Amino acid sequence: MEISARNKIKGVVKEIKKGEVAALVKIEGSTPTAISAVITKESVEELGIKVGEEVTAVIKATEVMISKE
């Protein structure tokens, strides 16, 4: 699949929490990285996302913030 987003992180699904409408999918990357994504429950079910599967988090944003402490 071709996609315009260039920020992609491969990882393994560690947890899925389904609500009435949305689902929280937690992904652990190969480097010490953790991504949490809120997507629709329907998307989780249609894509057949399951804990332990390898997926790719695709990040496309109109705004990126950086913080320095």
Image (spheres, rainbow, N blue to C red):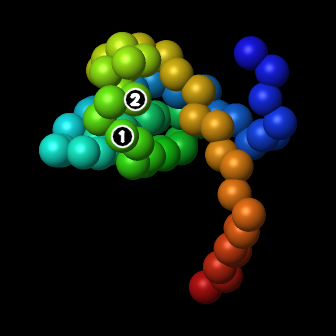
Q: Find out whether the residues at labels 2 and 1 contact each other: C-beta distance under 8 Å.
A: yes
- Residue 53 falls left or right of residue 18: right
The amino acid type found where label 2 is placed reads Ser
Q: Quadrant of the C terminus?
A: bottom right
* Relative height, residue 13 to residue 6 (above, below): above
The residue lying at 66 percent from left, 46 percent from top is 59
For image coordinates 29% across by 35% down, the residue present is 41
- The residue located at (38%, 18%) in the rendering is 46
- In this view, the residue in front, 28 or 42, is 42
Query: Circle 1 is placed at which residue position?
Result: 40
Q: Between residue 8 and residue 31, name the one nearer to us.
A: 8
Q: Is residue 68 above or below residue 31?
A: below
Q: Residue 43 shows which numbered tag?
A: 2
Residue visible at 74% across and 15% down? Answer: 1
The local crowd at label 1, few if under 14, some if 14 to 19, many if 20 or more residues have their Cα within 10 Å, is some
Q: Position of residue 15 (x, y in %)?
A: 28, 33
C-alpha separation, residue under disc 2 versus residue under disc 1? 5 Å
Residue type for callout 1: Thr
